[in-house]
Amino acid sequence: MEIYFILGTPIIIYYLVLTKLQYDTITETKSASVKSKKTHNELHETLPFEQQQLQYNLQGNIFNMPAVFVAMLIYKLRHGKE
């Protein structure tokens, strides 16, 4: 039983921190999209290469998908349809 606690605690902390990062990224992307009046794709085309790679690595990793889905759900619950 202790092994599950030892292995599970860092994973839960990882997903909690990553969910916060994902939520901040989603919020910033949506607000930048509204300010610039560009679509999501147009906004990403204007980003520097480093920013594009950061977005891809943060949201494209299969292990990060649970945090991405939770962050999107929290965003939709807080902000509704935009």
Image (cartoon, helix red, strand yellow):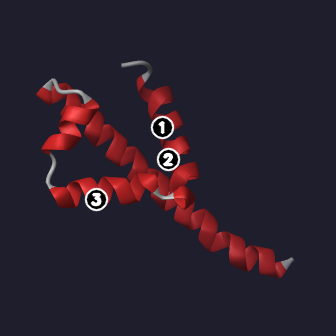
Q: Nearer the viewer, residue 54 or 45?
A: 45
Q: How many marks?
A: 3
Seen at 79% across and 74% down, the residue is: 4
Residue 82 relative to residue 69: left or right: left
Quarter of the image that includes the C terminus:
top left
Disc 3 marks which residue? 53
Q: Residue furthest right?
A: 1
Residue 68 badge: 2
Crowding near pointer 2: few (<14 within 10 Å), some, many (20+)? many
Q: Nearer the viewer, residue 36 or 20?
A: 36
Seen at 15% across and 28% down, the residue is: 35
Seen at 26% across and 34% down, the residue is: 41
Mark 1–mark 2 contact, CB under 8 Å? yes
Specify the amino acid type for callout 3: Gln
- The x, y position of residue 24, in whole percent, is 35, 47
Q: Nearer the viewer, mark 3 or mark 2?
A: 3
Looking at the image, is 4 positioned above or below residue 43?
Answer: below
Disc 1 marks which residue? 72
Seen at 41% across and 50% down, the residue is: 22
Which quadrant of the structure image shows residue 42?
A: top left
